Amino acid sequence: MAEAGLGQPSGIPGHEFSGTISGLGQDVVGWRVGQPVAVNPLAGCGECEFCARDTLILCRNRPNLGLNAPGGFAEQVIAHQSQLFALPASMQLELGSRVEPLAVAVRAVAEAQPAPGDNALVLGVGPIGLCVILALRAAGAGTIVAVGRSSAGRRATARVLGADVVLDSRELEPSQYVREKNLAISHAYECSADPRGLDMCCEALKSCGTVIGLALGNQPSSLNTHRFVARGLRLLSACAYGNADFARALDLIASGKADVVPLISERVPLEQAPEMLVRLQQPGDLVSVLVQPWRTAVQSEV
């Protein structure tokens, strides 16, 4: 099963998926047909400098599923055995599809290296921002301030997932809120792709705080470099994830430390996936949509 998302125009998308093994190559060991797995779509070679950094998305020696190779919407997906992560018997197969986005958030928090109890700001409450809230809560964060303007539904989900404060940036700037509440923000996660996002994070941070950029925006971002340098701020990026992050995300879900169920807004059969791809361009209250290929449209209407 896979989440509906946009991939290459000429390819087969689907980079957030889980499934069962239908066949094994002759050199594969330790796996069995029918075994439920979550699939890391990033297939690092394990030998280049980027794999050594566990930044698999930058490896050019193997294809990445759903990005430059057929992904989860294909009838069959070929994955290297290093990309498979076994799901425990107690874990629902569909939740394996939520490991990938949570791994993005796990990597971001790991890059920030927050101390337990540190207060954090999450700018943007789309799927990745919501996963960052989950990862922060699991890491023992203090007060989490979530900021979004996409929809009331997504802001409500942010609170369900563990945000202590949820703001609409059209009504109140996060920097104004933290000043009024005398709240020291140590880390800010830019998940919005707003051109002002980095500046908004920097304005809200305490001196010597850290900004972690996750969003891939289509427009250049503004950054007040005078404030950034004068206040001793740090700027980091979190580029996807590695195998260690993927394994950590799976453990958080399997153990119940990260409840990803609220991230699934709807479940649809495969034939309704094209319609959902269109809807997700203007998602409204949708967070993510789970495609279940074994269902049919008739069943979904019962």
Image (spheres, helix red, strand yellow):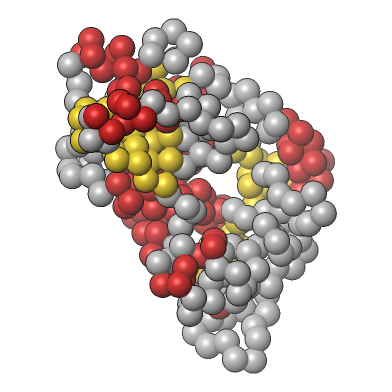
- Residue depicted at x 53% and y 27%: 195
Dividing the image into 4 quarters, which one contains the N terminus?
Answer: bottom right
Direction from residue 13 to residue 18 in the image, left or right: left
Q: In which image quadrant can residue 168 be found?
A: top left
Q: Looking at the image, which residue is at 60% across and 69% down?
A: 60
Rendering coords of residue 220 (x, y %): 56, 32
Above-or-below relation of 170 to 15? above
> Can residue 233 be seen?
yes
Q: Residue furthest bottom?
A: 26
- Residue 57, percent from left and from top: 54, 61
Q: Picture coordinates of residue 138 (x, y %)?
A: 29, 45
Relative depth, front residue between 289 and 15: 15
Q: Nearer the viewer, residue 244 or 48?
A: 48
In front of the other: 20 or 83 = 83
Say whether residue 121 is left or right of residue 262: left
**Residue in the image at 50% along x and 65% along y:** 56
Residue drawn at the location 44% of the way across and 15% of the way down: 169
**Label total for image:** 0
User: Horizontal and vertical percent for residue 78?
Assistant: 68, 72
Is residue 259 among what the camera can see? no
Instruction: For the C terminus, give its image quadrant.
Output: top right
Q: Residue furthest front?
A: 226
In the picture provided, is 290 more to the left or to the right than 194? right
Please say if 118 is above or below 52: above
Q: Residue furthest top?
A: 171
In this rendering, is residue 283 above or below 136?
A: above
